[in-house]
Image: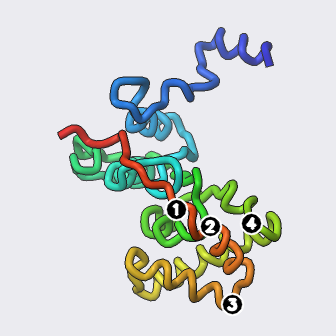
Amino acid sequence: MIKRAVFARELGVPIVMHAVIDRQKNHGMHFRVLAKALRMSGGDHIHSGTVVGKLEGEREMTLGFVDLLRDDFIEKDRARGIFFTQDWVSMPGVIPVALGGIHVWHMPALTEIFGDDSVLQFGGGTLGHPWGNAPGATANRVALEACVQARNEGHDLAREGNEIIRAACKWSPELAAACEVWKAIKFEFEPVDTIDK
């Protein structure tokens, strides 16, 4: 490990940047800069903020980050933290990763926010299932499939999400058990990373 650190230092390559990544406005590197740098350097995925779960993020700002990561052309939209129109031409995108306190009840919002090109990383939302890891993974997959199908059929996930999950519980005992475990888990706080007015 020390050998690798010395080699990286000689090259001037940072190994770990976690300490500079912060959503506080007066500390570290802003995520928008990191997202663009990662895309320009050929990165393939990054935790983009989640909006729901324990890792806060203002919805419009997170959607702006997701656009910067995935889309080829992004119009200026100050409300979403996009300060000028950007044309990435044919530069490959970066897959946004949602994680941090997410579970089956968040699936409608995650599907609505991130769509199809994303990674949903469930740690405790899978491993915390009362029947074990495999049923936890099954519950998450069933919830995702139910939400994608409902979205594709024209349902409003923001309004009908809980009913969609409850309906899927009728044919998935794994999902029903997960819903019972996670029903009272909520993270409610104000985001610190907001657009300056």
Instruction: For mark 2, give the secondary structure.
Output: helix
* CA–CA distance in space, label 4 to label 2: 9 Å
Q: Which residue is mark 4?
A: 129
Residue at image location 41% in from the left, 35% down from the top: 23
The reply, left or right, for residue 8 in relation to residue 190 is right
Q: Which residue is mark 1?
A: 117
Q: Nearer the viewer, residue 95 or 107?
A: 107
Instruction: For mark 4, give the secondary structure.
Output: loop
The reply, left or right, for residue 170 in relation to residue 173 is left
Whether pointer 2 and pointer 1 mark residues with C-beta atoms closer than 8 Å, the reply is: no
Pointer 2 or 1: first along the chain:
1
User: Label 1 crowding class (10 Å Cα cut-off): few <14, some 14-19, many 20+?
Assistant: few
Which is closer to the viewer, label 2 or label 1? Answer: 2
Residue at image location 81% in from the left, 68% down from the top: 134
Query: The residue under label 4 is which amino acid type?
Result: His
Q: Nearer the viewer, residue 188 or 75?
A: 188
